[in-house]
Every structure is written in structure tokens, then in C-alpha cells.
Image: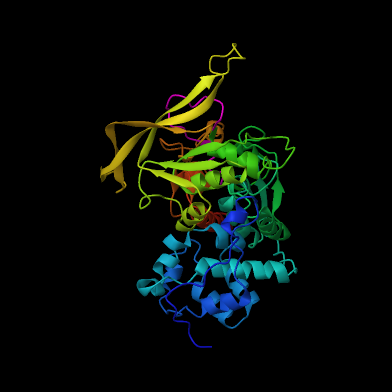
Amino acid sequence: MSPNMSLIKNPMPSQDPSVRIHNFDEVALGYTEQMAVSEAMRCLDCKTMPCAQGCPVKIHIPEFIRKIKECDFEAAYQVIARSSSLPAVCGRVCPQETQCEAKCVRGIKGESVGIGRLERFVADWHNDHCNTPPVRPTPNGHKVAVIGSGPASLTCAGDLAKKGYAVTIFEALHLSGGVLVYGIPEFRLPKKIVQKEIESLQALGVDIQTNVVIGKTLTIDELFENGYEAAFIGSGAGLPRFMGIPGESLKGVYSANEFLTRNNLMKAYKDHSSTPIMHAKKVAVIGGGNVAMDAARTALRLGAKEVSIVYRRTLEEIPARKEEVEHAKEEGIIFRLLHNPVEILGYNNPEDKRDPMNGFVTGIKCIKCQLGEPDERGRRKPVDIPDSEFVIDADCVIIAIGTTSNPLIKSSTDGLDVNRQGGIIIEEETGRTTKEGVYAGGDAVTGAATIILAMGAGKTAAKAIDEQLLN
């Protein structure tokens, strides 16, 4: 076949916005075989492989794309699987545009190759056509405990299991998958996809124990007493941040963590749910990251008539993925930019005199901003404009301004040092913590970040654990 020199990617088929806002089905529908081969033909197969240099888990990207060109889709999957334990997940939610695709030569004079879309296609093709379980490696006699079951933990567990380690994952919730299950909506990442990836790890011999809260049910020291020779902490960053403004205790105010967990994990969007969540008419989401987009788009699907993103900067500075912003706009989400919330407004329920804080949200008081000088991270800092306060009507407010690590593991583990933000301190090259035999990675170290960076941290720690136990 001739090279495809089109300057733009093959468009991703997706549900019509007017239809998808009424369901929780996946928005992006995926490439057909013909689309995938056409997109693969846009790859120039660069010898220097700049795309692979931008991949935190070091997938050999030109090689798997080459296999797609040859229509050998299973071989393409096997190339990806050498480096990634979660290809179907990464193909959907990894920010390729700032990593592998950002390095693509085709992006110099047009759009980069759709690497993420091709990864998703290959993983889905494999899941649809191949039922042969992976071959379990010969046990090497060593036991490793993995705390949490999010992307960092699943990657670490998978890499170690492939080397013959007896790996046990300890998950605090009743379902495994971590943020992949409780944090990302069904319309972006179907849970059957996550479950399929987890089943592949279990087929390798990984044992998963749910409803085990490390730091409460068991301590890390007790894990070592029970025969584990090393432990990896990948417990994520599940503790929500709040703004510290008046009105955050009003009814109708949620952290994005609670709002999304109750919908994604506990299915609050279903009729007769045992954990219902209020169906608001006007929803305001404070924040501009992927979590804010997820919360806003979820609120819309729950029946809200108006949903706004309230963000202190402009679209140029918004941290959410471009695709997520575009999807939100298509669905009718309102972007209220250069707005800084200063108070959540409400009124008391006159029928309940017992609790003076028993109020309900009526709106958000904001002040307009303009961008000033760059802050310490190089981002232009929002500066309030005097005498520019105004009110946005809302009966529900969702705060999505970030998360930190839960302090439970640190408070129950002697010798495990954390930084001022609560992140576990590690040696970057190995993931080794200040406690002997304990490693960490992902959001538990960095605070809320991307799934692919967490996976990269899991791979780093797995390599270091293997070197520690076998050398």
C-alpha cells in the first residue's frame, strides 16, 4: 500500500452529541480495520523513533504500527503487551497528544499519527478475537505485596508476575481497578474494558484481595511478617482538596471524588440506586482538569439543564485534554473562564431549625480575573479584578481542584517519609521509599497526575524490586 500523506488523522467515529448526553455509553466508537490501516499508513517509520521516546512505558510504537500496516493485528498487540499491561485503557485515556504524539514527525506539518487511536484499535481487536489465556511463568519463589489496584499497581503487579513472582494486590474498595473504576466515567472508559485487563493479570497468577485497607485491616509491617519480601504502594491520591471558601458545607456541594465515585462505582445514575445522588438543574463545576470535564459531563447525563465549568484561566491554560474539552463543548457544557469563585451561596431549610448549617446551594459568587505574571510553574497567575463580583445561579456545586494522598498508610507505617503535600518520598530512579523493602509510585507520590505516568512509575518499581530480590 502507498503511504498516506494526509495532514490530518482519520476522524474518530463517535456518538452524536444530542444522543450521547442522554446515556452513559462510550462516546468514541473506535476505528474499523480499514480506518486503522489507513491511519497506520501515515506513519513514516522513523529510525530514531521520537514517538517511543515520549512514551513513559516505552512501547515500541513504530513496530506495532508496522504490524497494523501488514494487517497482523494480533502481532501488533503482542508488541504493545511487551511494555504495557493496560493497552485498552491507555488507548482511551492516555494523553498521547502531550507525550508520544507530541514527538511525532508528522505533527510538524499537520496532525501527528493517531497513536492512541491505533493502540485502542489493536487492544480491542485482541479482546474481541483472542481468548487464549497467557502462559503462567514458572514461579521464582518470591512474594511481593502491592497496595492499591490502580494503574501504577496493576502495571507493577503485571511486570512482576511475568517474571514468576507471587503477587498479591490489596484493594480497599470492593472492586479492583482504582481510579480506572471509580474516577473515570463509563462513557469514557467502559468498566468491562478495565475488568478484561484485570482478568489478564489474574490469568498470570496475580491474586487480588478486596476490602483490605492497608493501614487499618493490615499494616505494611504485618505484610512483611506474613512472608512478603517487598511491597509497592500505589494507593493513589483519593483525598479531595477544597477551596476553603464560605459555603462549602452546604447541601448540594460535592467533591468531584465523591460525585464520580457514587456514579461510576456505585451506579448512582441508575433508577432505584441504593446510593442516589441529587439530580440538579443547574450545576457548576469548579476546576479545569480532566476530572472537572468528567464531572460536568456526568452531571449533564444525570439530567441537569445547565452545566458550567468555572475556571480561573483561559482555554489556552486549561489542563484537561483537548479531546475532552471538545467533547464537553459539543455536549453544551458552558465554559465560564477567568472566573474565580469566592463564596458558595445558599439558604437554610425553614422546616429544619435544628441545624443552622442545613442549607442548600443557590449559586456561586465569583470575581472576574485577568492573567498576570507567570507563577513558579511558568503559568500566568490569575489576578482578581476589583469590584467585578457577580453570581452564577446553581443548585449543585462540584469542586474539582485536585487531590492528595490519604495519610492512613503514612500514619500507620514507621520510617515512611512524605513531603509537605503528603506525597511519599521516593528515589526517582527506583521508586524506593525511605522504608526498607518498600517502593511507591503514581499519585501516592506525585499527587493527581496521568494514568500513563503512574504506569511508568509502576514499571520502574517492578524493575527495582526484581533487582533487589534476585541479586
Of all residues, the one furthest to the top in this rendering is: 353
**245 within the magenta span:** yes
Looking at the picture, tell me which residue is in the foreground, 82 or 348.
348
Quadrant showing the N terminus: bottom right
The residue stretch that appears in magenta:
234-253
> In the rendered image, which quarter is residue 29 located in?
bottom right
Of all residues, the one furthest to the left in this rendering is: 373
Residue 415 shown left or right of residue 204 in the figure: left
Query: In this orientation, does residue 359 appear?
Result: yes
Q: Where is residue 215 in the image (x, y as percent from the top left)?
A: 61, 34
| Residue 354, placed above or below residue 276 | above
**456 within the magenta span:** no
Q: Where is residue 191 in the image (x, y as percent from the top left)?
A: 67, 53
Count of marks, rendered view:
0
| Residue 25, placed above or below residue 69 | above
Looking at the picture, tell me which residue is in the foreground, 265 or 450.
265
Identified at 65% across, 75% down, the residue is 74
Query: In this orientation, does residue 405 appear?
Result: no
Q: Where is residue 237 in the image (x, y as percent from the top left)?
A: 52, 41
Looking at the picture, tell me which residue is in the foreground, 180 or 329.
329
Q: Position of residue 150 (x, y in %)?
A: 59, 49
Looking at the picture, tell me which residue is in the foreground, 363 or 411.
363
Quadrant showing the C terminus: bottom right
The prevailing secondary structure element of the residues shown in magenta is loop
| Residue 199, placed above or below residue 379 | below
Identified at 45% across, 73% down, the residue is 8
